[in-house]
Amino acid sequence: MFGLGWWEILALVVIGLLVFGPDKLPQAASQAGKTLRQLRQMANNAKADLQANLGPEFSNFDPADLNPKTFVRKHLLDDLENDWNGTPDAAPQPIGAAEPELGFGEIPPYDNEAT
């Protein structure tokens, strides 16, 4: 739960008991739960409003894609993973005939201007 282990949860409960006391701890926990539900509902409503107002072109838009780490992972690293896994990517092939595959022991062509 939230990346916390049992020891961390136990420590949070003990700290909560010390701060709020055993009488007010259930009230504080229920208030925190209500607040978390309200925040989650507000975020879901904002996301739905954003998707509805952007139009059909952005129907699969996810605000998490605006995070730079997510953007780089999605648009740059997925292509590298596809190359490493040998799966074809969606890039268009160059115009013209495909180059023949080299057989065992064949030397690839050398371009003096490329180096």
Image (cartoon, rainbow, N blue to C red):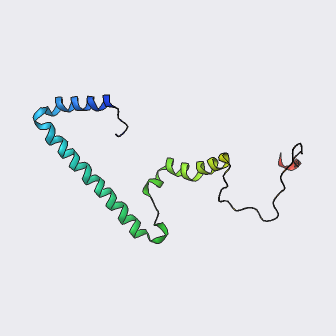
Q: Where is residue 42, by image quadrant?
A: bottom left
Q: Nearer the viewer, residue 105 or 35?
A: 105
For the point 18% across and 46% down, which residue is it?
31
Q: Is residue 95 above or below residue 64?
A: below
Q: Is residue 36 left or right of residue 69?
A: left
Q: Nearer the viewer, residue 32 or 10?
A: 10
**Quarter holding the C terminus?**
top right
Q: Is residue 38 left or right of residue 64?
A: left
For the point 21% across and 50% down, which residue is it?
34
Expressed as whole percent of the image width and height from the top left, the position of residue 57 reads 49, 69
Q: Is residue 24 above or below residue 65?
A: above
Count of numbered labels shown in the rendering:
0
For the point 32% across and 31% down, which residue is it?
6
Which residue reaches farthest bottom? 56
Expressed as whole percent of the image width and height from the top left, the position of residue 74 reads 54, 52
**Quarter holding the N terminus?**
top left
Q: Is residue 9 left or right of residue 112?
A: left
Q: Is residue 112 above or below residue 92?
A: above
Which residue reaches farthest front? 104
For the point 21% across and 28% down, which residue is it?
14
Expressed as whole percent of the image width and height from the top left, the position of residue 54 reads 43, 68
Expressed as whole percent of the image width and height from the top left, the position of residue 25 reads 15, 37
